[in-house]
Image (cartoon, rainbow, N blue to C red):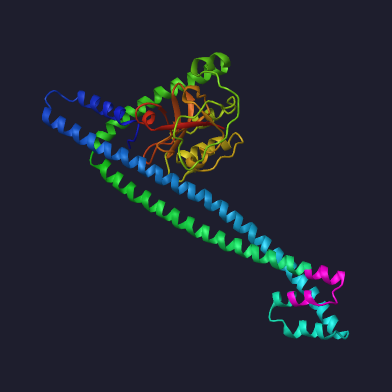
Amino acid sequence: MIRRTAPAVILLCFTASLAVTPAAADGGSIAAKQAQAQSVLGQVQQLDSSVERAVEAYDLATTKLAHVRANLKQNHAELQVAKQSLRRAQSALASRVVSLYTQGGNENSLEVLLGASNLDDLVNRFNAVNRISAQDSQVLGQVKTFNHQVKTREARLKKAKQQADALVRERAAAKASVESQLASRKALLSSIRGQIVTLQRQEAARQVQLRRELAQRMAAQQATPAQALTNTVAPVASAPSTPSTPSSPPSSPPVSTAPPATHSSVVAVAERYLGVPYRWGGASPSGFDCSGLVMYAFSQIGVSLPHSSYAQYGMGSPVARSELQPGDLVFFDGLGHVGIYVGGNSFIHAPHTGDVVKISSISGWYASTYVGARRI
C-alpha cells in the first residue's frame, strides 16, 4: 500500500513508471491514468492523515482509561479498608452505648439510644451527651473519621466510573471512525491496484538505499562520535525547559533549550523493526502504530513512555529542528504522527495501515506538517 512518502515523491515515482511505458501506448490514455492516480492518491493521503489522528485519539483514550481503571482499583481497595475500619469503630461505639444504658445511663443516654434515626444522627446525639469521657471521644472520633473516608471513597469511585464510561465511549467512537475510513481507503486503492504494485517496488528499492545510508551514519558515529555529531547536527544548549501541553501543538517552533541527547541508542533498537507491518493500536514486534513503535523502542532501553503521540509530546524537552539529534522524537500533522529521528534529516516510523516500519525524510508532506520535536 502507498501512503505519504509525501505526495510529491509518490507522484514523481508514478510519473517515472509511466515514462517506461512502450511508445505505442496511447498518450491520452496515459494522461488519463496519471490524472486518475493523482486524484486517488490525493484522497488516500487525506484519509491516511485522518485515520492516523483517529488512531492516536484511540491510543490516548486507551492510555487515559488504563490510568482511570488503576485509580478505580486503588480506590476500591481503600474503600474496603475504610469500611472495615468503620465497622470496627461502629462496633466499639455500639458497645459503649450499650454499656451506658446497662449501667444505668441517665435520660441523656436514653435519648441517644431511642431518638437516633441513623448513624450520623446517633453520632451527633452521642456527641452532645455530657457523660462523654476521653475514651468515648476517641471512639466517636474514629467513627466520624472512617465514616467520612467511606463517603469520600464512594464519591471518588462514582466519578472514576463515570470517567471510565466516557472513555470507553470515546474509544468506541474513535475505533468506528478508523474502521470506516480504512474501508474507504481500501476501496480507493483497489481502483489503481496495478499502479500501486509499481510504486511498491520503487519504494522498496528506496528503503534499501535509506537503510544503507543509516548504517553508514551509525558506523561513522561509533567510530568518531564527535565528528559524526558535527556532521549531522549543531551543538545543543543544556538548560532545562518545561514540557508543553500534550493536547495541542505549539503555536511557534520550540526554543532550543533541551539538554544533551542521551538516548541515541534507541535508533539501533528501532532499526531492528524495519519492515514490521503497521497495525493500529499495536505496540509489539507483531505490529506497531506510530506511537506504539516509539513507546516499545524506548522501553527496550529502560525509558517508559505513554502509548499516544499526544501524550508523548508532553514528555522531555523541546528541541529546535536545526538541532535535532538521533533519538529525538519528531511530530507531524497536529501531533497525529510521531517518529524517531535518526540523523540526516530522516526518521524511523510506522506510517499507516498497509505500510511497514520504515525510514522517511523530513521533506514534502512531512516538512509541511512538521510540528516540533522532543528530547527524552
Is 127 contained in the magenta span?
yes
Q: Nearer the viewer, residue 74 or 142?
A: 142
The spot of residue 245 in percent (x, y) is 51, 40
Q: Residue at x 48, y 58 (%)?
A: 166
**Corner quadrant of residue 156:** bottom right
Drawn side of residue 189 relative to residue 284, left or right = left
Q: Is residue 166 above or below residue 55?
A: below
Drawn side of residue 103 relative to residue 202, left or right = right
Q: Residue at x 60, y 29 (%)?
A: 240
Q: Residue at x 50, y 50 (%)?
A: 62
The spot of residue 363 in percent (x, y) is 37, 26
Q: Is residue 285 visible?
A: no
Q: Residue at x 73, y 77 (%)?
A: 122
Q: Is residue 47 above or below residue 253?
A: below
**Corner quadrant of residue 352:** top left
Q: Nearer the viewer, residue 209 or 237?
A: 237
The spot of residue 120 in percent (x, y) is 70, 74
Is 39 contained in the magenta span?
no
| Numbered range of the magenta stretch | 124-140
Q: Is residue 106 visible?
A: yes
Q: Is residue 224 above or below residue 177?
A: above
Drawn side of residue 167 relative to residue 113, left or right = left
